[in-house]
Amino acid sequence: MARTSAFSVTRSNSSVRSIDDSNRHGSALSPTQPSDDANIQFLRRRHIECAVGCQCRNDLIVKRTDELLRVTENALVRASVSPGEGQRVGDICAEIEDEARRFRFSVVREFVGHGVGRKMHEEPQIPNYGKRGSGPKLKAGMTLAIEPMINIGTSDVRLLDDGWTVRTADGMPSAHFEHTVLVTKDEPEILTWRAKTQLK
């Protein structure tokens, strides 16, 4: 995950968790309650990124939160299988935004996916919104962190004083799923693929 200006995370083999309305980078030491679903991010060596997000605030919005998780996962799948040589970054972004809008959710605009290479956060930036046929052209060999970040309420988020944790501005649940994808001359290779999702 990168902010629209460079936002670097360099921890390797570490995990951070975000609870409820946290969208990004909860503290690794923050306590959780038995009822909390946690957003676990694994930041692995060589900058291979994979994240599954789950925030659930209370029973009144459990159904909508379950829907949010399914939609965010579907957006990840749609976006991860779309990159091909000669396509545009906007093609990936539109897949995420279309899936979110179809279910009346909003997408986080302040933080984006990104290229992955010698540094964790490189160009091109991959927002969760965009138009098909726009943006930089994809080339074989490019590695991309595709990161749908979708909210139940407003798209706005706020960075806490710790300079690390990001929460939704309205305190409503948010979800974040992520894959690292290699662009090839044929079908994209999902480097963080698991045979079956953890969600059921």
Image (spheres, grey):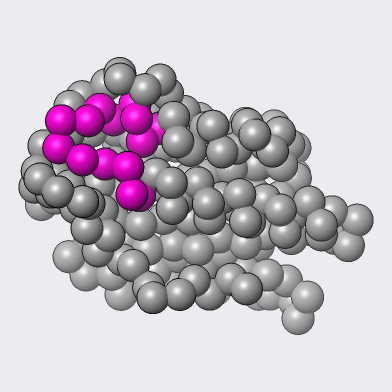
Q: State whether residue 147 is above or below residue 179.
A: above
- Residue 7 lies, in percent from the top left, at 34, 41
Q: Which residue is at 21% across, 51% downward?
A: 187
Quarter of the image where the C terminus is located: bottom right
Q: Which residue is at 43% across, 46% downward?
A: 78
- Residue 96 lies, in percent from the top left, at 48, 38
Q: Is residue 81 magenta?
A: yes
Q: State whether residue 164 is above or below residue 86.
A: below
- Residue 12 lies, in percent from the top left, at 27, 69
- Looking at this view, name the residue that lies furthest to the bottom: 34
Q: Which residue is at 44% across, 29% downward?
A: 94
Q: Which residues are magenta?
A: 80-93
Q: Is residue 16 visible?
A: no
- Looking at this view, name the residue that lies furthest to the right: 60
Q: State whether residue 117 is above or below residue 92.
A: below
- Residue 61 lies, in percent from the top left, at 84, 54
